Every structure is written in structure tokens, then in C-alpha cells.
Amino acid sequence: MPNIAALLKSEITRVARKEIRAETETLRKTIAAQRTAIAALKRELAELRKDCKTAQQPRKPTVAFDAPAENDVKRRFSASRLATHRQKTGLSASDYGLLVGVSGQSIYHYEQNKARPHAEVVRKLSMLKELSKTQIAARLEELKAAA
């Protein structure tokens, strides 16, 4: 025959656990909801910080490629620098040529020093080097859409 004290103790423990579980269930749900809200706030904060950081960066002025050259300085051409810049931007020779207004084959000839670009093309190449990758990509999309 089981010990009455042991039975009573196990029954009291079972009932106490049941009561504690019922009381803590609402707290668990509240905590889970708060954690979800905190995670959403952290994501929003990270996005706002990113937006703030990009807003604080100085913007490079967009260069008008077709504008007349006022107070134009003498620009030099380097075939190796042209090739390096084209590779850095990740553009094909035909895309790079589209940005400048020449053919892709001309870009290859310029890079291999088989041909020298005219002064106007040199000016456009130097202006292209002043743009960021995103500005170059945007300009390329504009030109492709227009074509």
C-alpha cells in the first residue's frame, strides 16, 4: 500500500505545477509578443540608420556629358587606366562605349593603345571616371532605355 504522505505530496505538486503553468502561460505570450515587437523595432532602427547615413554622404554633382566644355583643362589619356576603370566598374566594352558615345571596338582599341581617342572622347572618358558606380549604372540604364 502506498504511503499517504507520498501520495499527498505528489498530488499537491501536480496541482501546483498546473496552477503555475496557467499563470505563466499569459506571461509567455506577452513576452513573445514583446520580443517580436523589439525585433521589428530593431529592423526599423537599422533601416533608419542606413537612410540617415546615405543622406549625410555628400552627393557628387552629375556631370553633363553633352555640355560644352567651359574652362576646360588639358586632359591626358592613359590606355591602362581606361582598362582598369572599365574592369573596376564591371562594364563590357560595348556598354562603356555606349556611355562615352563610341563603339565597343573603339574602347578595345583605346585600351590596347592601337588608337587614340579624340579630345572630346577624352573629355567624356574623364567625366565618366568622376561618377560613382551607381551613377554610371543609372546613366547606362537611361541610355539603353532611350535606344
Image (tube, rainbow, N blue to C red):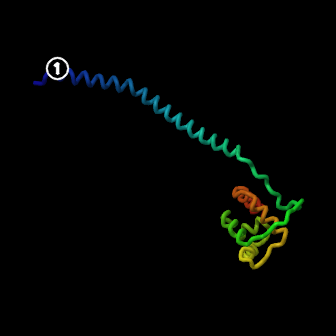
Residue 141 occupies which quadrant of the picture? Answer: bottom right
Q: Position of residue 39 (x, y in %)?
A: 53, 37
Compared to 73, does 106 lie above or below?
A: below
Residue 113 or residue 66, whichever sits in front? 113
Q: Which residue is mark 1?
A: 5
Residue 24 occupies which quadrant of the picture? Answer: top left
Residue 110 occupies which quadrant of the picture? Answer: bottom right
Q: Position of residue 122 (x, y in %)?
A: 81, 68
Q: Is residue 127 left or right of residue 53?
A: right
Q: Residue at x 26, y 25 (%)?
A: 14
Q: Position of residue 103 (x, y in %)?
A: 76, 72
Q: Secondary structure at mark 1?
A: helix
The quadrant the C terminus occupies is: bottom right
Compared to 54, does 139 lie above or below?
A: below
Q: Position of residue 2 (x, y in %)?
A: 12, 24
Residue 71 or residue 64, whichever sits in front? 71
